Image: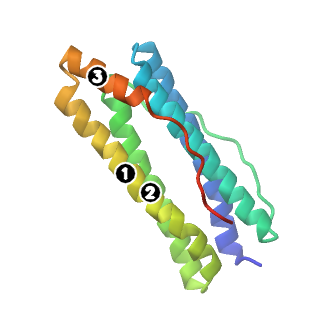
Amino acid sequence: MLNAKVAELLNTQINKEFYSAYLYLDFANFYEDEGLKGFANWYRVQAQEERDHAMLFIQYLQNNGEKATLEAIDKPGVALRDRMSPLKAGLEHEEYVTSLIHNIYDAAYSVKDFRTMQFLDWFVKEQGEEETNASDLIKKMELFGDDVKSLYMLDNELSARVYTAPSLVL
């Protein structure tokens, strides 16, 4: 049986992961409207990842005899003014999610919930990758975004991204 605070934080994380999916779908819609289908694809794949992260948290709670509670998902509230704004908002959001994962980890550590800590280890590693990917996209846009040909090539590069389901064993 999970500690009540840990279970509550895990439940809250479900909503945060679904919100992340909504946010990235909003970014995908923005880039689709901009005619940047590769960027749109990149964020649609990102949304799929976030949705599956939420599902992993649901499954973990259920596997540990806890009820997964689904709450309303907030509408994304990020102002998307230019091609760079979703990228910067994405990095900021990933840093926020990292802080949430660390908070759950800290709560699990404080009650010696080693099973939850082991479950969260994958997410800690994943968040490091997410922040790196988001930061790399910003750097590429800063380097190539003002040049039409380079932007076209970057967009093509991002269109090649495909979704791979997480291989986390619960």
Q: CA distance from mark 1 to mark 2?
A: 6 Å
Q: Position of residue 58 (x, y in %)?
A: 72, 57
Q: Closer to the N terminus: mark 3 or mark 2?
A: 2
Query: Do tag 3 and tag 1 residues touch (Cβ < 8 Å)?
Result: no
Q: Is residue 16 left or right of residue 142?
A: right
Q: Closer to the N terminus: mark 3 or mark 1?
A: 1
Of the numbered discs in the image, which one, if any, rests on residue 127?
Answer: 2
Q: Position of residue 66 (x, y in %)?
A: 79, 67
Which image quadrant: the N terminus? bottom right
From this view, report whether residue 123 is shown above or below residue 35: below
Give the secondary structure at mark 3.
Answer: helix
The residue carrying mark 1 is: 131
Q: Mark yes or no: residue 15 visible.
A: no
Q: Amino acid at mark 2?
A: Gln
From this view, report whether residue 163 is shown above or below residue 16: above
Q: Amino acid at mark 3?
A: Met
Q: Amino acid at mark 1?
A: Glu
Q: Residues within 10 Å of mark 1 (few under 14, many from 20)?
A: some
Give the secondary structure at mark 2.
Answer: helix
